[in-house]
Image (tube, rainbow, N blue to C red):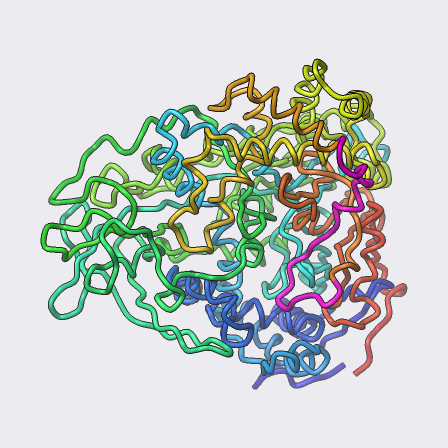
Amino acid sequence: MEKQGRENFSVSIEVYRDAWGVPHLRAGDPDELAFAQGRVTARDRAWQLEVERHRAQGTTAAFLGAAELGWDVFARRVRLADTARLCFARLERADAPTAAWVRAYVDGVNDGLAEGARRAPEFAETGLAPGRWEPWTPLAVWLSTHILFAGFPTKLWREEVARRLGEEWTELFATDGPGTAGSNGWVVAGERTASGAALVAGDPHRFIEAPGVYQQIRLACPAYDVVGLAVPGIPGLAHFGHTGPVAWAITNAMADYQDVYRERLRRLPDGGVEALGPEGWRPATAHTETIEVAGGDPVVLEVIETDRGPVIVGVEEEPEAGGSEGGPVGGTPEAGTPVGNAPADARTAGDSPAAGAPVDGPAGGALADGPVGGAPEDGPTDGAPEGGRPGEGHDSEGRGWEVLALRHPPRVTGELGFGVLPALLRARTVGDVDAALDGWVEPVNVVQAADTRGGLLHRVAGHVPVRDRLNSLRTVPAWDPAHAWADAPAPLPRAEVRGHAVMANARGLAAPLGVEFAPPHRADRIDALLGASADWTPQAVTAVHRDTDNPSAAPLLAAVGRAEAGLSPAASAVRERLLAWDRRMDAESTDAGLYAAVRGAVVRRLAGHEAFAALREPAPYPEVFRPWLALGPRVAFALETLLTAGPVPAGDVDRIVREALEEVAAGEPPAAWGTTHRLAPWQALPDPDDARWPGLAGDHDCVLSTSSVPGWTDRSARASAARYVWDLADRERSGWVVPFGASGVPGDPHHQDQLPLWLRGELAPVTTDWQYLTKEQG
């Protein structure tokens, strides 16, 4: 197929499809192939691409309305698009071939958008016309997808716990808990497989979106032939790929690499802004931007950046601008306070605590290293304020105010790591993968890889700044030099693979780099399952994906066991059923549904206990951060801890469990778990038929991880965004699946044809023999 795809660039591209509509692309060189990838993605997923472009630019409210204003304000304030431009400019200077490769992808997107938009009814529904991608747009999409991935708003939550509940309770929600549950991954060495070659398998758990966040694709040219899971809008295969000789996969390392600084600002007579840093008052940049809002008035906001980073909270609190001394952060939507719904905001949180939280709640988090020990001991300098929230600590003449600024590596270094992407496609050994990942930046990942020579890899990749430990725990004063970043990033851990290795966001390899990790339940369960055989096959490995054992139920079941005295006959019957339950969260299990009902009742009562009264008032931060900051879901995700520790006395905990048993016993018998535990994917437009989404097996800490918010909703907004098994003996014995399908176009035969497979925990085959693929014509 010959096509003039861009000026002076004649492309010769072949597009094939397998039985599931997955695109297999063949071209004459890597740049032509990148063009083909961009074009086929635009044709298959134009609506998704345009939503992501607008989210990265902070322009979604212009066609989706005021509900998206909160995200747009945050995206503008944190300067996502500008950071992407900065990183692309650096890429052009330092790695021109990769910059040209990204440009080729963007040219392909622009070439295919018009056709893709004609196929996607959402454009007509919203009145959106397809726009134009710039060379830096993929970098902006990547930043938008991952800016909340490290969960920096958790630091705001810790501040609120310390301020309202007391310093001694800062660690209360800080043990490793299910709120930080995330992806699974494992590698099995050839000595433990039936073929004698390694297997790499797993599943990334993310906020589920429709269309899905991962795109199955094959990229083939004379330089390489790779299958894997791409992120729509990003060239190459960043996270999961199989080149034939080598395969790799990642999970979130749960590293802490973003800091929130308390900044003191003051307005100059000429309208400029200064910020107080370690060297005194220094100029800050400031400008205004206008956000268009469909069906509403435009919103004008000021964007300020200090030497630490962009100001994300408290701009409106300047006294002269109408802020009130000592008042809460933010203000009206017109002043730029986000009003978007939490699921839409939390969708970018990946493995971080917020993912899957409802509008009034986060997933929990945990300080694993003991009490924080209070706010910074080193006091203010040069007239700096004495801590407090943004909006507090004005000087005596009312000319200064305090805000929060975000510092993160791409904004500081101008590097995003995109040079790694083409290097991964060319990889032939784990050594190649290892060397390529030395240039990775964000997000920080744990990586596993295996090759056909017997090589194995287990390491952390990314940029983690070296700085004071307190930076990782709380907001820190910008004027104190103790909280500056060192010039060089932290060294990255690695480990030898012996038989098999597991990565599941738990404390382990990446422990020196983070604070909060997932509990060990999934990692321990996968490790035990893998240890039970030395004859693994790709087919057998899929059973690990499907495991529904729920180890985190043990503390509540222990409390139920203690609740024998004083129960009514009906509550005693509920108790006996739970104690006999096999702990499996199967969709058809009424015992699992009974457990979930009792758990929810316990969570609600714990959250309502007077010990937590001080935390019930909404935290004074923009709504975009609310998924991390609400009490109820925090209690839900810290349940294992709160049943045995915390401010609620042990006697009250036992009483609460008895009351929960009585509540459930007095109501209608709970339905099977899958009746209420249904899929709830994020979509840019409301779903007219929400009831069509199916019931799910699994729970937070099952290997089959499908997260809800106990006590608030059983609906699952987060689950496996894909599953894969890479076989190093024969790539065609590999398998993969996504929650919906290869196409993002409603009504397309491949729009949701993989959903039944995904629900059953099965994989579609990876077909690489061109003769068994169907070539597209025209």
Residue 687 shown in magenta: yes
Q: Position of residue 548 (x, y in %)?
A: 77, 34
Quarter residue 311 falls in: bottom left
> Can I make out residue 1 in this image?
yes
Report whether 189 appears left or right of 275. right
Taking the image as drawn, is residue 29 in sight? no
Can you say whether 602 is above or below 217 in the image?
Answer: above
In this view, the residue in front, 200 or 153, is: 153
In this rendered view, identify the residue nearer to me: 683 or 192: 683
Quadrant where the image shows the N terminus = bottom right
Residue 351 among magenta residues: no
Is residue 90 shown left or right of residue 283?
right
Report the quarter where the C terminus lies.
bottom right
- The region drawn magenta spans 665-689
Query: Residue 631 vs residue 711: left or right?
Result: left
Q: Is residue 761 left or right of residue 200?
A: right
